[in-house]
Image (cartoon, rainbow, N blue to C red):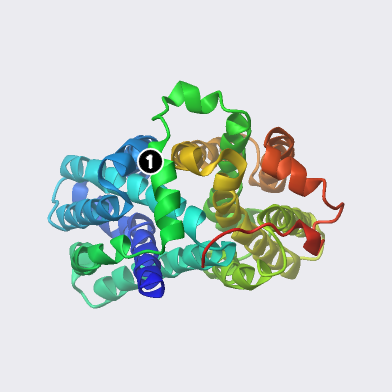
Amino acid sequence: MVHLLLAVIYLSFISLGLPDSLLGAAWPSMYGEFNVSVSWAGAVSMIIALGTVVSSLQSDRLTRMIGTEKVTVVSVAVTAAALFGFSVSHSFWLLCLWAVPYGLGAGSVDASLNNYVALHYKSRHMSWLHCMWGVGASVGPYIMGRALTGGYGWNMGYRYISILQIILTAVLLLSLPLWKKQPDQIQKKAAASSSEKLLTLRQIIEIPGAREVMAVFFCYCAVEQTAGLWASSYLVLHGKMTAEAAAGSASLLFIGITAGRALSGFLTLHLNDIQMVRLGQCLIAAGIAALVMPFGTASSLTGLILIGLGCAPVYPCLIHSTPEHFGAGRSQAIIGVQMASAYVGTCLMPPLFGIIANRIDVSLLPLYLSAALILMIVMHERLLKKTPYAAGVAAAAGSIFSKELTVDSDTV
């Protein structure tokens, strides 16, 4: 039963990724129909992101009320309805209206499932699950592309993804009994988690290490999303690459993230979460350095791959270590604010660099990424000093590759 439920959770992570890249893939075909400028995609994206932040912050309350399994079913169903709403929208304002449940559906299930996996499964599963998210994020634009090239229009692309989400909702409904047939150890952890007092946002922020981990997630998304959004422009305007070549080359970042997460699952058999985060940070630094090396296109493309590989372990390993840093009873609340901080970083930092690139120069991208990375490293190290688990583990050895650092008490 444990492995069957794990398969359902893997499927859920693929579904989380399916809608995430759709707007960017479909918008060139959408904005003309709505008689708006191309920049108005930012408004829709912001509404989705704000809804995600709100639902992430409420994930602890919702999970305590109805459980992770029901949060997952309801959230996927809401997302399916929102995607169907997109497919039948013929005005920009109706699109904005459907963007509200689109965002609300994503945040709570993301936080709730991440916490469940962090509590009950080994680190390798967290890396592989986020790899599955990458698979979904890659498949979504492919389905949209097939709908567009087939002459069916962007509406049908959204409808196809909506149908897939409806099917997944049915699968999740059928899987509800599996969540109740878990080993005693998992049931005890769940009981301990739900017995903790519900915390307010202010109380969560006052927990030692909470501000630091929020800053780490903010900075991580600043690096990943800014690099993903502006890599093509950097390659064209600074690297003198053609727009057509740059569009394909920029995907190397996401290929690196997806492949890196698949590889990270195996590395976690020998390295713990703290080591994996530090390793990822080193690879990101190497990638940024490669972007500025005077070796032409090859250096820039190598840099993007290295940044992607570096990003791969950071996000899932930070989430997986949350119960160890803050305790199982508070992990859902902490993961909720972590998710919210991540989405705030996604909302603010890529547009901020856009202003810098427009008013100064896009060649400042490596410097911008370096500033976010340095702050991420500083905040992560401060987090390690403020949490008993991390401080004890970090003191056990001086190398990120020391096997003595491995601490894992998970069930699967």
| Image location of residue 129, percent across then percent down | 47, 65
Q: Nearer the viewer, residue 59 or 344?
A: 59
Quadrant, the N terminus: bottom left
Residue 36 visible? The answer is no
| Image location of residue 279, percent across then percent down | 74, 58
Q: Is residue 323 above or below residue 58?
A: below
Q: Which residue is mark 1?
A: 194
Which corner quadrant of the image does residue 340 belong to?
top left
| Image location of residue 317, percent across then percent down | 60, 55
Relative to 385, is 263 on the left or the right?
left
Residue 52 visible? The answer is yes
**In the image, farthest residue toward the front:** 184
Q: Is residue 44 above or below residue 20?
A: above
Which corner quadrant of the image does residue 127 belong to?
bottom right
Residue name at image x 75 percent, y 41 percent? 391
Relative to 163, is 227 on the left or the right?
right
Residue name at image x 16 percent, y 43 percent? 94
Residue name at image x 49 percent, y 62 percent? 130
Element assignment for label 1:
helix
| Image location of residue 45, percent across then percent down | 35, 44
**In the image, farthest residue toward the right:** 398
Relative to 289, is 311 on the left or the right?
left
Residue name at image x 44 percent, y 43 percent? 192
Q: Nearer the viewer, residue 314 or 329?
A: 329
- Disc 1 marks a residue whose amino acid type is Ser
